[in-house]
Amino acid sequence: MILLLSAMPEEIVALRAGISVVELEYGAGREFALGMIGVQPVVLAFSRWGKVAAAATAAHALSRYPIQAIVFTGIAGALQSHLQIGDLVLADRLYQHDLDARPFFAPTEVPLLGLAALPACASLSARLEEAYGHWAAAERQAGRVAPSLYRGAIATGDQVIGDELARERVRKITPEALCVEMEGAAVAQVCHEFGLPYACLRMISDHADARLTPEQVYALAHRSGATALGVLRHWPRH
């Protein structure tokens, strides 16, 4: 069973539409939807915004369900100029760009873990990439343009990065990061400490600037959920 998390209600609505045999359960002030996406049993939950809320959601789910892996999906702001709105980023590692415990630890290093970046699971991410390949082929066959998929680092922090100054600050701390969001590295840390596979798939909704209205962001969040659902429906059987 996979725990599927997203941080925007619009993403959750789009994902919920693809879950069959939905059973709703409640705990810790959260709703958990249990069912199937394609051949994959899932628990779907709204992580809420930010690192603490997302980590709490993940930890609570792990305490009550037989979770074998966690996949986080949702929108993110691009930090690299070649990324376009709608492109997908699959994490291979995740940084907490706002974690700075100097002089005891280096910037972004998680205290007592000895890690400046939290790793994503290579095999779980490869399964998602395989699912993306099948979905993208189906999209092209139907005459639609599939978004590009990139593998790389993701930056996480408890701020909405919405202007050039903030964007450049994140880029300076994590220059290799492709995009920035608010939850991914926190859930990666939970998975690392629990010894569980973790993957993070993000859709670019903006360029970490103030060009989009909130309404446009909400619409792109729904698109992100629909895209993640399309990918997950092609989850490999092996």
Image (cartoon, grey):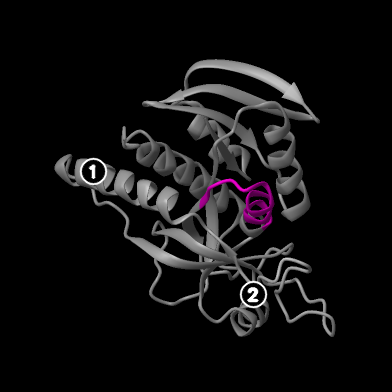
How far across and down, in percent of the image, does residue 56 sit? 76, 43
How far across and down, in percent of the image, does residue 26 sit? 73, 22
Residue occupying the point 64% across, 74% down: 163
Judged by depth in the image, the label closer to the viewer, 2 or 1, is 1
Label 1 sits on residue: 139
Label 2 sits on residue: 163
Left or right position of 126 against 162: left
Residue 190 sits inside the magenta stretch: yes
How far across and down, in percent of the image, does residue 133 sit? 26, 49
Q: Nearer the viewer, residue 169 or 34?
A: 34
How far across and down, in percent of the image, does residue 161 sit? 65, 68
Residue 148 sits inside the magenta stretch: no
Tell me the kind of residue under disc 1: Glu
Left or right position of 188 against 125: right
Displayed quadrant of residue 106: bottom right
Q: Nearer the viewer, residue 172 or 36?
A: 36
Q: Nearer the viewer, residue 14 or 133?
A: 133
Q: Nearer the viewer, residue 101 or 154?
A: 101
Residue occupying the point 35% across, 33% down: 233
Residue occupying the point 49% across, 33% down: 15
Would you call the spot at circle 2 few (<14 residues within 10 Å), some (14-19), or many (20 or more)?
few
Would you call the spot at circle 1 few (<14 residues within 10 Å), some (14-19), or many (20 or more)?
some
Determine whether 102 is above or below 156 in the image: below
